[in-house]
Image: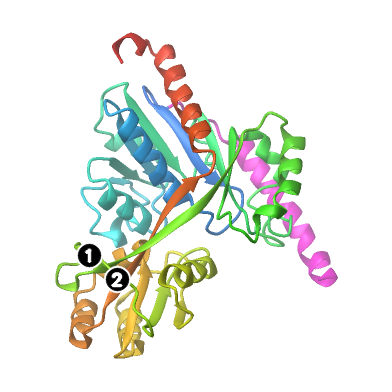
Amino acid sequence: MKILLYLFYPLSLFYQFLFWWQQRETSSFQLPNVLVISVGNLTVGGTGKTPFVQYLVRFFRKVYPGYAVTILSRGYKAEKSKDGAILADGLSPNLFGDEPSQHKEMFPDVQVIIGRNRKKSFLSYNQIHSKKHIVILDDGFQHKALCRDFDFVLLDANSPFGNGFTIPLGFLREPIRNLKRANAILFTKINSKNKNGLEKYYSNLKKIDPFLPIFSSQFESSVVEVLIHNELAQKTFLPKPNSKYFLVTGVGNPKHVFETAKTTLLSESIRTKFFPDHFEFNEAALSSLSEEILMDEILVTTEKDWIKMRANVGFLRGLERKKTTVLLLLIQVSVLEDEKLKSMLTGLVSTYETKNDLAVNT
């Protein structure tokens, strides 16, 4: 470990300098006539941003039905990311990205815009021309190019700061002290094993900002069966004793998905195959995967993965020939201080309406 420290610490410091310089040289643009809420993280890897974005969308659609909601995302690894695009549906993850496609399929009436240059993409493709408009900036904590009204930063309760070092020595995108830019912290993936160890992290965060709101959350999981002949249709699935499962996923934290699958399916008999985050699931990979699935196994995957797998008709036909049951592992965020968080969100909208002379008309 000491050898690695000597080798990579200078590189880590150099990375921090480059990050600082890039932030210093980047000016921020205020999107016109919108309330911008950023959902981001401090570390590389999955902290649960996607389900929290969906939590926010559900809240705003329910409590503020007069408001339009837009999800603005980079569209990581998407073919359209460079030029930007607006999604018509969630059926082309290779063009628009897996997570944006998942958002669009879940919320068809929500505007989803992608683009590496998110300012340009929003100004080019936004079709909502009302001040009653909330933009959720997905993975936005490091995206200084856009001003935001509020910054949520998500921390994985299992390892909030990794080893405490920035890339390449650790998993931090930027130093912990930079959380002073955050408006609220949300610990994710709280469970009986990690909740008692969070107090020390709370203490560290309060040293950075004694008034920083801190929330905690856990995942609620369920499974549904996909009807392969109509891959957008689903039905309830009841786990059966002695079933054999094959979990396939390409997400930022596959071990957490595995633990969630074991709990949800009430089974230890789960074979696994993990791919890198945002894995493409191209023709060759799916052909190989199809051969690996045993005749008596049930295929288990996430919504994010399935949205790419199902685009391959040959793969779907292979599953039908084998009579393979396909299960989707569904994840939703449950915030432990739910009422407090919703009250804060209500306050954000109230402040925005006052600033934009909308309060009387709401």
Task: Please tell me in which quadrant of the rendered image residue 8 appears.
Answer: bottom right
Residue 310 is marked as: none
Left or right relative to 331: residue 150: right
- For disc 2, the marked residue is 309
Left or right relative to 289: residue 220: right
Q: Which residues are magenta?
A: 1-30
Label 2 sits on a secondary structure element that is helix
| Residue 250 point in image, percent of width and height | 44, 69
Q: What is the total number of numbered labels drawn onto the structure image? A: 2
Q: Which of marks 1 and 2 precedes in the sequence?
A: 1
Identify residue type, mark 1: Lys
Residue 117 visible (yes or no): no
| Residue 196 point in image, percent of width and height | 70, 53
What residue sits 22% from the left and 51% below the top?
Answer: 89
- Closer to the camera: disc 2 or disc 1? 1
Work out whether residue 199 or residue 250 is closer to the camera in this orientation and state it: 199
Depicted 343 relative to depicted 350: above or below:
below
What residue sits 45% from the left and 79% below the top?
Answer: 273
What type of secondary structure mainly makes up the magenta span? helix
Left or right relative to 154: residue 165: right
Work out whether residue 246 or residue 172 is closer to the camera in this orientation and state it: 246
Work out whether residue 147 or residue 11 is closer to the camera in this orientation and state it: 147
Left or right relative to 128: residue 41: right
Residue 219 visible (yes or no): yes
User: How many other residues sit within 10 Å of disc 1, few (<14), some (14-19) or many (≥20)?
Assistant: few
Task: Please tell me in which quadrant of the rendered image residue 179 appears.
Answer: top right
Depicted 118 relative to depicted 346: above or below:
below
| Residue 127 point in image, percent of width and height | 24, 33
Depicted 95 relative to depicted 59: above or below:
below
What residue sits 76% from the left and 48% below the top?
Answer: 200
- For disc 1, the marked residue is 235
Identify residue type, mark 2: Met
